Amino acid sequence: MSKNVTQVMMDEHQLILRMISLVETNTEKMEAGLFKDCNFYLDAIDFVRNYADCFHHAKEEDVLFVELVKNGMPEKSSPIEAMLMEHDQGRAYIKNLEEAVLKSIQGLEDQQPVIAENAKGYAALLRGHIQKEDQILYPLAERVLPETVRSRMTDAYEKATDPDVEKRYVAMVEKYEGC
Ligand SMILES: [Fe+2]
Ligand SMILES: [Fe+2]
């Protein structure tokens, strides 16, 4: 049986989706005047940067997408280009979100609409992004990637995986889910 190279990524999506649900719920509460915890947003930004981006997107960008291109998927005008563009759009939302949260912590008023816009924008973008990867790109990868590259890929994933990082972010999500 051929070695699966996308299940680990789909599992990581599940933790990312749990954080996205928290962002959506807390942002709705914030807009209703029932929530104001800048630390939650700072933690969510930390999660996105270090788990979703460094941990997960790095595996896609440095391993999975690279192998797909090596094995015939075009780099331009292709699903890969679209996914990379969405990773960048996500980073832009998070940068704007961070700026607004920091301004709010410094006492600047009227940051709430900017926080809400970027938090909700990121959540919607990532939900759609994950759906496309889970339902289209990853199944395609499982169909087209030859057996010969798969061990190399899982070895590279393992090198990029730090169990302590994973544990830290699982604990973060669980903490906020319990609030
Ligand atoms: Fe992605
Ligand atoms: Fe992904």
Image (spheres, rainbow, N blue to C red):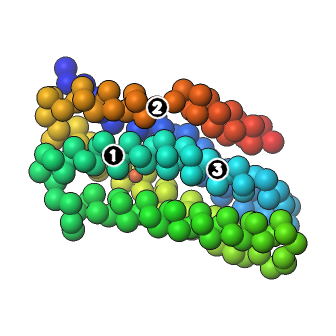
x, y percentage for residue 157? 37, 33
Please name the residue that numbered disc 2 is placed on.
161
Do callouts 2 and 1 mark residues in contact (Cβ within 8 Å)?
no
SS at mark 3 in the image: helix
Q: Residue furthest front?
A: 159
Residue at 49%, 50% (x, y): give it: 53
As shown in the figure, which amino acid type bears the numbered disc 1? Asp
As shown in the figure, which amino acid type bears the numbered disc 2? Thr
Q: Classify 145 as above or below 31.
A: above
Task: Assign the N terminus to one quadrant of the image.
Answer: top left
As shown in the figure, which amino acid type bears the numbered disc 3? Asp
- Whichever of callouts 2 and 3 sits on the residue coming sooner in the sequence is 3
Question: How packed is label 1: few (under 14 Cα within 10 Å), some, or many (20 or more)?
Answer: some
Disc 1 to disc 3, C-alpha distance: 21 Å
Please name the residue that numbered disc 1 is placed on.
62
x, y percentage for residue 160? 43, 34
Whether residue 8 is visible here, answered yes or no, is no
Q: Is residue 125 left or right of residue 74?
A: right
x, y percentage for residue 74? 16, 59
Residue 46 badge: 3
Q: Is residue 170 left or right of residue 8?
A: right
Do callouts 2 and 3 mark residues in contact (Cβ within 8 Å)?
no
SS at mark 2 in the image: loop
Whether residue 73 is visible here, answered yes or no, is yes
x, y percentage for residue 99? 69, 69
Task: Assign the C terminus to one quadrant of the image.
Answer: top right
